[in-house]
Image (cartoon, helix red, strand yellow):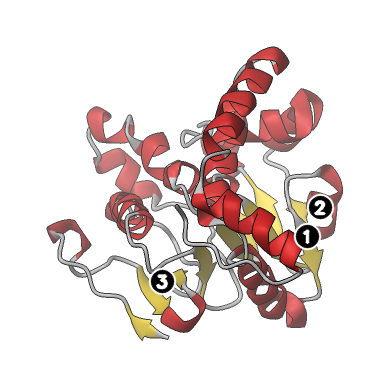
Amino acid sequence: MTAYSFAADLLKELDGFRVEFDEAHERADIVLHRPPMNIVSMRQRDQVRAVFETLDADDRVRVIVLRAEGANFSSGGNIAGFMEASPEHVSELARNIAAPERCRKPVIAQVRGYCFGVGFELSLACDFRIASETAQFALPEMRIGMIPGSGGSARLLHMIGIARTKDMVMRAKRIPGRKAAEWGFVTECVADAELEATVDALAEELRGFSPLAQRTIKGVLNSGNNVSVNGAIEIEGQAYGRLRGSEDFKEGVASFHEKRKPVFTGK
């Protein structure tokens, strides 16, 4: 992979992370690298949002992977930064961390070791979380007299229900990777040595689908998660109708009948 270059002022001198681009596999990796704990700074939150928006607009990128160097994904945010930030800045934290969710492309979080606080909240905003058996997940804010502020408890509530969310958040409880998979907020938990290969395989699988259909279903599911069942069905039906006239759908039908691999263009 080669370093990805950006022109925007905000993205000069990335703070605590880098972006790599693998053109052959249409993949961009956002790599946290502030070892050993990969603590996330306030500026880094703003930059991560801007990076996701930049990658979302880049047609060369089909899949995004969020990962970290070293033994830990992230132990959380820079606590001192919260005390120095203005109320206006703090109010934007959840919007910044929601960037993977807003991104129209599939986003995979690759997690090993500690995944706490804002690191955990950032992974929860991704579409897939692939965890190593070494992974531990927690929202430990209660230990410093605070609560999660970047969407973590709200997303968990939808994923695992109120009883487990209270058990985890109100007790600042650490959940190991295997249990996280059992509870349903981790897509898959694998042996540590298999983590990279599992993520690579998933990224390759995802880029084989129609990018237009992929963008559409991600939007449908995200919107449907916040409305009634009837509302979600309506959203799905409207999106389905719009896709019926797409070139990708025509190509998918033709390739099915011709028994060949489809060539999707995202149109």
**Residue found at x 56% / y 65%:** 73
User: Which residue position holds label 1?
Assistant: 188
Give the image quarter of residue 225: top right
Whole-percent x and y of residue 9?
Answer: 12, 59
Spatial CA span between label 3 and label 2: 27 Å
Q: What is the three-letter code of the residue carrying label 1?
A: Glu
Q: Earlier in the sequence, mark 1 or mark 2?
A: 2
Depicted 29 relative to depicted 138: above or below: below
User: Which residue position holds label 2?
Assistant: 181
**Residue found at x 42% / y 45%:** 99
Which quadrant of the figure contains the N terminus?
bottom left
Q: Is residue 61 left or right of residue 88?
A: right
Front residue of 213 and 267? 267
Viewer-nearest of discs 3 and 2 = 2
Q: What is the three-letter code of the residue carrying label 2?
A: Ala
Whole-percent x and y of residue 245?
Answer: 52, 40
Q: Residue 149: in sight, yes or no?
A: yes
Depicted 136 relative to depicted 33: above or below: above
Depicted 237 relative to depicted 150: above or below: above
Q: Residues within 10 Å of mark 2 (few under 14, many from 20)?
A: some
Q: Is residue 1 left or right of residue 25?
A: left
C-beta proximity under 8 Å, tags 3 and 2: no
Callout 1 secondary element: strand
Q: Is residue 220 left or right of residue 182?
A: left
User: Which residue position holds label 3?
Assistant: 34
**Residue found at x 39% / y 53%:** 78
Q: Residue 22 has which mark? A: none
Q: What is the three-letter code of the residue carrying label 3?
A: Arg
